[in-house]
Amino acid sequence: MTNTHTGPELRMPASVAASLTCPVCGRHLERGSRGLACADGHSFNIAREGYAGLLTGATPPGTGDSKEMIAARLRFQGRGHYDPVGLALAEELTTARIGAGSVIVDVGGGTGHYLTQVLDELPGTVGLTTDVSKFAARKAARAHPRSGAVTADSWRTLPLADGTADAVLNVFAPRNAPEFHRVLKPGGVLVVVTPETDHLTEPRTALGLLDVDPRKGERLAESLGEHFSPEAGREVRFTMELSHEDVLTVVGMGPSARHTTPEDLARRVSELPEPFTSTASVRVGRYRPA
């Protein structure tokens, strides 16, 4: 297979690019004249923003975030509201001795915001964001000079070779424990962020939205099952001062907003005081492959 190629540049560290595999057959992907391809002839495009499009088959409507949703999320993240979560991730990885030369994969990582925070705190590490949304991948591909991005479905086989990652991050995203286990090195670490029962309790109460499932901790343990053993866990709790736009964005990130219309939600948010004080409360859990 020739390495001569034209077209968009694949924006990711060489060590990460070398670990990409075909989502169809699992064979190694190389750069060819038309993008990425495996020895079996399966080929995939590289977008002009520099991410690799590695989705296969159909994804259910509404699975990935839209362009508008990503724009709103970027505004919210840019205001620093969830920065304590990213710093907590970096602290957990530091404790787990993830350092220079390590590969960190954020599965379902959206715009690459949390991975960017982690890479800034851990010099010499490199990373990859996977997400089903091409609009998220466009941003994640350019989020940090030591990271890249691919579109991939978290519920399917991840397009990475066995034992690629020193660490896997999973922040408010789907959990595919068998795949996390497969792509992690034997001594690697998984860090999972999930909402506590009082996360965003003020806007959820004021807007009449769904509560966080009180069995979320049990379901997390069940989802990781035989593949991972808990190593440490802690609550990260802080207060946010939110504009009406911020409230709409943060409740839209979760499942609650799906049970009302955008028009009704916007009307109810407009009746809230501004700024609106909200509690953020999440659990940061660290796990090792079983």
Image (cartoon, helix red, strand yellow):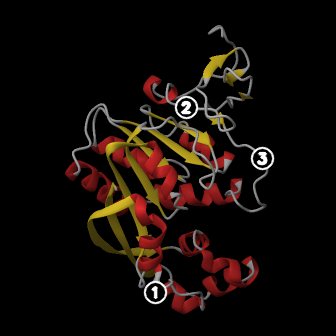
Residue identified by numbered label 2: 20
The first of marks 2 and 1 along the sequence is 2
Q: Residue at x 69, y 22 (%)?
A: 35
- Secondary structure category for the residue under label 2: loop
Percent position (x, y) of residue 222? Answer: 46, 72
Q: Residue at x 61, y 28 (%)?
A: 27
Which circle marks residue 214 in the picture?
A: 1
Percent position (x, y) of residue 162? Answer: 47, 37
Which circle marks residue 57 in the picture?
A: 3
Q: Nearer the viewer, residue 157 or 282?
A: 157
- Do the numbered discs 2 and 1 sit on residues whose CB atoms are within 8 Å? no
Q: Is residue 154 visible?
A: yes
Q: Residues within 10 Å of mark 2 (few under 14, many from 20)?
A: many
- Secondary structure category for the residue under label 1: loop
The image quarter in which residue 68 lies: bottom right
Q: CA distance from mark 2 to mark 3?
A: 18 Å
Which circle marks residue 98 in the picture?
A: none
Q: Amino acid at mark 1?
A: Pro
Q: CA distance from mark 3 to mark 1?
A: 34 Å
The first of marks 3 and 1 along the sequence is 3
